[in-house]
Amino acid sequence: MKVHINQDVCAGFGICVGVCPEVFELHDDGYATVLVDEVPPDLQDLVRTAESQCPARAISVSDDASS
């Protein structure tokens, strides 16, 4: 699974970091960044939770490794 944050949409709420700090962090500019190229299987449910809870809808996930 791959995860992407649309930097044009991210509002820096940080909910993703609270849900899954192993995959997300807030960058120095206050907006979220992704820490991994591929989401480990044991964290995929948390990443999907972060995606669904993002108020700005800035997070997208893809099961296709080529995305």
Image (cartoon, helix red, strand yellow):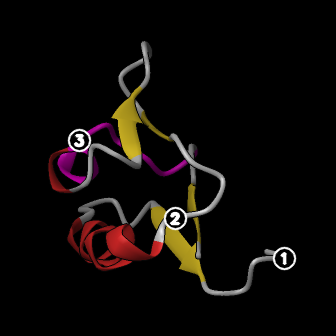
Q: Residues within 10 Å of mark 2 (few under 14, many from 20)?
A: many
What residue do we see at 62% from left, 62% from top? 38
CB under 8 Å between discs 2 and 3: no
Asked whether 29 or 48 is in front, the reply is 48
Which numbered circle lies on residue 39? 2
Q: What residue type is labelled 1?
A: Ser
Q: Which of marks 3 and 1 is in front?
A: 1
Q: How crowded is mark 3: few (under 14 residues within 10 Å), some or many (20 or more)?
A: some
What residue do we see at 38% from left, 44% from top? 24
Which numbered circle lies on residue 14? 3
What residue do we see at 52% from left, 71% from top? 60
Quarter of the image containing the C terminus? bottom right
Q: Earlier along the polypeptide chain: callout 1 or callout 2? A: 2
Q: Residues within 10 Å of mark 1 (few under 14, many from 20)?
A: few
Asked whether 10 or 52 is in front, the reply is 52
Tell me the magenta residue range.
8-17
Residue placed under numbered mark 1 in the picture? 66
- Is residue 12 positioned above or below 52 on the image? above
Which numbered circle lies on residue 31? none
Q: Earlier along the polypeptide chain: callout 2 or callout 3? A: 3
Q: Cα distance, mark 1 to mark 2? A: 13 Å
Q: In this view, does 24 lie to the left or right of 65?
A: left
What residue do we see at 15% from left, 47% from top? 18
Asked whether 34 or 14 is in front, the reply is 34
Q: Quadrant of residue 46?
A: bottom left
Q: Is residue 11 magenta?
A: yes
Q: Which amino acid does label 3 sit on?
A: Gly
Q: Which amino acid does label 2 sit on?
A: Val
Q: Cα distance, mark 3 to mark 1? A: 27 Å
Q: Position of residue 61 (x, y in %)?
A: 54, 75
Q: Which element is circle 3 on?
A: loop
